[in-house]
DNA sequence: GTCTTTTTTAGAACTATTCTAAATTTGCTA
DNA sequence: TAGCAAATTTAGAATAGTTCTAAAAAAGAC
């Protein structure tokens, strides 16, 4: 754990708004002005591959990053661009409502919803 | 409807294997050797924005395209790279199992599952 | 059939991300 | 604490999927 990784992780814990690498870079510079964008990517890769951070991809937009580890989906508000965590209701296993191919073993489930918030 | 758009659409109807723009380009060249990659992208954009074709994005891999219009998710077999359509069981509304933000109006729901097929 | 609009095309440009290679830091062992 | 190997950081170059540009071609309306 280097100071760069700590700063990146702290940025993600601070504001849980699913920032992009570029936004994380800008916030991290406030703590550690010498940090480089390549390092932000390196740190995010390390955190993601150690399952401490989740990478959220919606369409082909820049990846966003999220320190919420419990299983959840994402609601993408198309009027504001905000991304909001969507919890599954207690004890719900979504896969039981799907016609999965025979023998399917699930490693990862990703649910992205686009829409807007009325009022 | 131009001949290029027809060819692109026909390619998608022919083999329902979720090809990338590059693959569609290669297949389209068999029918219309003068077609360009930019045109493939243009045609796909037109088809997608007219809701005749769906664009499927998984991680940050190249977009794939799909002529299956009924609501479904995608199973991404990590050993073969194949993408398999996953139907929802009859009369299931996945959103009723989610804690959506108040006032959420859904325009689009995307479900991507990664894993592999045992045996 | 002419005219306006749309589409196609090739190639340049763009952008998020990854790679490279040198410099620095880490952390182990003594 | 010093020395050393391995890992990490850094700046800048490179990459790759996609989008843009502007000229040529095609489509469709009248």
Image (spheres, coloured by chain):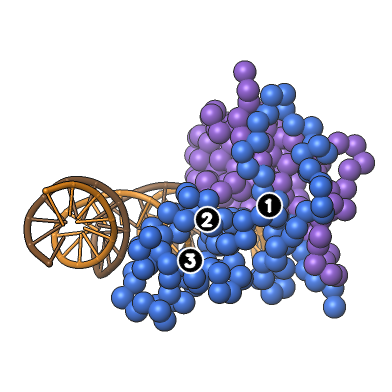
Chain colours: A blue, B purple, C orange, D brown
Check the image and report above or below for A97 versus A35. Answer: above
- Where is residue A90 drawn, in percent x and y? 82, 52
Circles 2, 3 touching at the beta carbon (< 8 Å)? yes
Residue B106 point in image, percent of width and height: 81, 60
Q: Residue furthest top?
A: B119
Q: Which of the labelled discs sits on residue A39, or is there none?
A: none
At mark 3, the secondary structure is helix
**Residue A95 in the image: above or below residue C21:** above
Q: Which numbered disc flags the more N-terminal residue, 2 or 3?
A: 3
Which label's residue is closer to the chain start, 1 or 2? 2
Residue C11, placed above or below residue B18 = below
Crowd tier of the residue under label 1, counting other residues whose Cα lies within 10 Å: few below 14, some 14–19, many 20 or above = few
Residue where numbered disc 3 is placed: A9
Q: Is residue A18 visible in the rendered structure shown here?
A: yes
Taking the spot 81% from the left edge, 62% from the top edge, the residue there is B100
Residue wearing tag 1? A71
Q: How far is the residue under mark 1 from the one under mark 3? A: 19 Å
Disc 2 designates what residue? A52
Chain identifier of the residue bearing label 3 in the image:
A
Can you say which quadrant of the picture contains the C terminus of chain B? top right
Residue drawn at point x = 83 percent, y = 64 percent: B105
Residue at mark 2 to residue at mark 3: CA–CA distance = 9 Å
Compared across the picture, whether B61 is left or right of B70 comes to left
Kindly tell me whether residue A39 is visible in this rendering. no
Within 10 Å of the Cα at label 3, are there few (<14), some (14-19), or many (20+) other Cα atoms?
A: many
Chain letter of mark 1 equals A
Which residue is rendered at x = 59% and y = 52% of the image?
B42
């Amino acid at each position: 754990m280097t100071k760069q990784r700590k700063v990146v992780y702290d940025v993600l814990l601070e504001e849980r708004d699913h920032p992009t690498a570029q936004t994380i870079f800008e916030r991290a510079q406030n703590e550690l002005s010498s940090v480089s964008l390549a390092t932000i990517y390196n740190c995010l890769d390390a955190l993601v591959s150690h399952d401490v951070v989740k990478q959220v991809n919606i369409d082909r937009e820049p990846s966003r990053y999220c320190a919420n580890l419990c299983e959840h989906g994402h609601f993408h508000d198309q009027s504001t661009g905000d991304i909001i965590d969507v919890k599954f209701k207690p004890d719900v296993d979504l896969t039981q409502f799907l016609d999965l191919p025979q023998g399917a073993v699930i490693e990862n489930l990703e649910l992205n919803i686009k829409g807007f918030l009325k009022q």
